[in-house]
């Protein structure tokens, strides 16, 4: 596991440990509450990656600069692309047969666009064009193509999870501050994914057989808003007329149907369970 000390990574480590796996966390920092052994590793150094992956049966690669504009653009791109290449290069050479890499809804381009974008249709599925204007979103597309290349090269199973906005349980207390305002979170199409459900998706993506290479959206079944999905779209994206689903309630606008079908995955957590 790379990035196992981060917001999502701690839940993914716990998910695998609780299901009986022997987990090693490769990260630049120690976790707040360790659930497994951590090896301090610079993933931009290929030799270090070989060392930490030796003996592994599978790899889940979550480590990255997680947003656009927190670092100089070229630093974000270089770090995210090189670390992913190194992880998959070492995994391929070491004979590791299965990998999961963290991609992002940001690859569709809406999230960090300097020139505001409008979705071509909703819910956005994996066939929607990826149109980033930022180095972070671009790095995710390059990483997906890197995963596809290594699948072609070695036959390694590579599952790229296009994660929605990752929400840990303690973050639900913030939802009442925004969930009535369509202008809030419109860049992410009001999507989210509970860390526990994302962790389950990571585990299932490792446990499933014969997936080849595949990219999957990972989002909750509902939006993060207490406003109907049709009303959200009418408020913030009134020019969108291509609705691929009926949208009669609070349905997600980042489609998770493919992940459900391929992984046998179903989100178990919604903010509506935790916020009165």
Image (cartoon, rainbow, N blue to C red):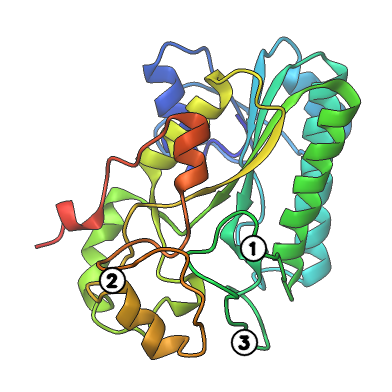
Question: In this figure, which residue is indicated by the disc labeled 1?
Answer: 128
If the image is split into quadrants, where does the C terminus sit? bottom left
Q: Which mark is residue 54?
A: none
Question: In this figure, which residue is indicated by the disc labeled 3?
Answer: 116
Q: CA distance from mark 2 to mark 3?
A: 21 Å
Evaluate whether residue 245 shows in this view.
yes
For the point 40% across and 81% down, the residue is 233
Residue 223, horizontal then vertical, whole percent: 33, 64
Question: In this figure, which residue is indicated by the disc labeled 2?
Answer: 225
Q: CA distance from mark 3 to mark 1?
A: 17 Å
- 133 is higher (above) or lower (below) than 244: below
Residue 145, horizontal then vertical, whole percent: 81, 46
- 199 is higher (above) or lower (below) than 235: above
Label 2 near label 1: C-beta < 8 Å? no
Mark 3 neighbour density, 10 Å: few (under 14) some (14–19) many (20 or more): few
Residue 258, horizontal then vertical, whole percent: 52, 43
Q: CA distance from mark 1 to mark 2?
A: 23 Å
Q: Secondary structure at mark 3?
A: loop
């Amino acid at each position: 596991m790379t990035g196992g000390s981060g917001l999502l990574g701690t839940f993914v480590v716990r998910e695998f440990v609780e299901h009986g796996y022997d987990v090693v966390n490769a990260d630049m920092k120690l976790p707040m509450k360790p659930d497994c052994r951590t090896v301090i590793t610079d993933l931009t150094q290929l030799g270090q990656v070989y060392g930490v992956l030796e003996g592994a049966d599978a790899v889940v690669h979550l480590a990255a600069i997680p947003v656009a504009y927190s670092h100089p653009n070229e630093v974000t791109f270089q770090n995210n692309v090189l670390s992913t290449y190194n992880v998959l290069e070492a995994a391929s050479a070491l004979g590791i047969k299965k990998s999961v890499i963290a991609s992002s809804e940001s690859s569709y381009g809406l999230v960090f666009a300097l020139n505001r974008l409008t979705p071509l249709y909703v819910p956005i599925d994996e066939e929607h064009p990826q149109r980033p204007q930022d180095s972070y979103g671009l790095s995710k597309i390059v990483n997906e193509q890197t995963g596809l290349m290594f699948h072609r090269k070695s036959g390694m199973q590579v599952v790229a999870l296009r994660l929605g906005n990752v929400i840990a349980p303690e973050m639900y207390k913030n939802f009442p501050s925004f969930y009535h305002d369509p202008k809030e979170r419109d860049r992410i199409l009001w999507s989210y994914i509970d860390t526990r459900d994302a962790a389950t998706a990571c585990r299932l993506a490792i446990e499933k057989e014969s997936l080849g290479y595949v990219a999957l959206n990972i989002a909750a079944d509902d939006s993060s808003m207490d406003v109907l999905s049709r009303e959200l779209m009418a408020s913030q994206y009134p020019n969108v007329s291509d609705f691929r689903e009926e949208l009669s309630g609070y349905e997600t606008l980042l489609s998770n149907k493919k992940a459900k079908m391929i992984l046998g995955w179903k989100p178990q957590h919604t903010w509506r369970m935790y916020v009165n």
